[in-house]
Image: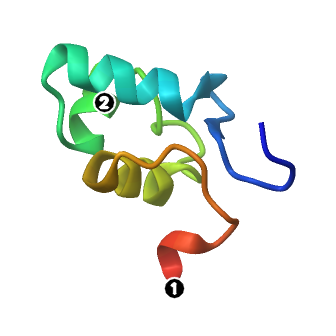
């Protein structure tokens, strides 16, 4: 794991590569669908922009603030 990268949903303790695999396995394409399943991004929601970017691009490791650039 790269240092100083955003790589997980902290509240649910799930790495983004786990979230990506789960989304692909269940045909999930939106953060809202993951939230409905209480899988990630529905507690503090700090990872939400990263999860959205992950679902669009497949990327699972981010520079802090990357989705906002």
Badge 1: residue crowd in 10 Å (few <14, some 14–19, many ≥20): few
Give the residue pinned by disc 2: 34
Q: Percent position (x, y) of residue 60?
A: 51, 43
The residue at which mark 1 appears reads as: 69
Which quadrant of the view contains residue 11? Answer: top right
Residue 26 vs residue 31: left or right?
left
| Residue positioned 27% across, 25% down in the render | 23
The picture places residue 41, in percent across and down from the top left corner, at 47, 39
Taking the spot 25% from the left edge, 41% from the top edge, the residue there is 32
Residue at the outermost bottom position: 69
Closer to us: 9 or 23:
23
Marks 1 and 2 sit apart, C-alpha to C-alpha, by 24 Å
The mark closer to the camera, 1 or 2, is 1
Q: Residue furthest front?
A: 2
Q: Residues within 10 Å of mark 2 (few under 14, many from 20)?
A: some
Q: Secondary structure at mark 1?
A: loop
Query: Foreground residue, 65 or 21?
Result: 21
53 over 9 or under it: above or below: below
Q: How many marks?
A: 2
2 displayed left or right of 41:
right
Horizontal side, residue 12 vs residue 54: left or right = right
């Amino acid at each position: 794991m790269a240092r100083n990268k955003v790589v997980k949903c902290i509240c649910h303790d799930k790495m983004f590569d786990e979230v990506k695999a789960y989304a692909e396995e269940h045909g999930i394409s939106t953060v809202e669908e993951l939230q409905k399943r209480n899988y990630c991004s529905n507690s503090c929601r700090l990872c939400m922009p990263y999860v959205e970017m992950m679902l669009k691009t497949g990327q699972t490791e981010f520079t802090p603030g990357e989705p906002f650039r």
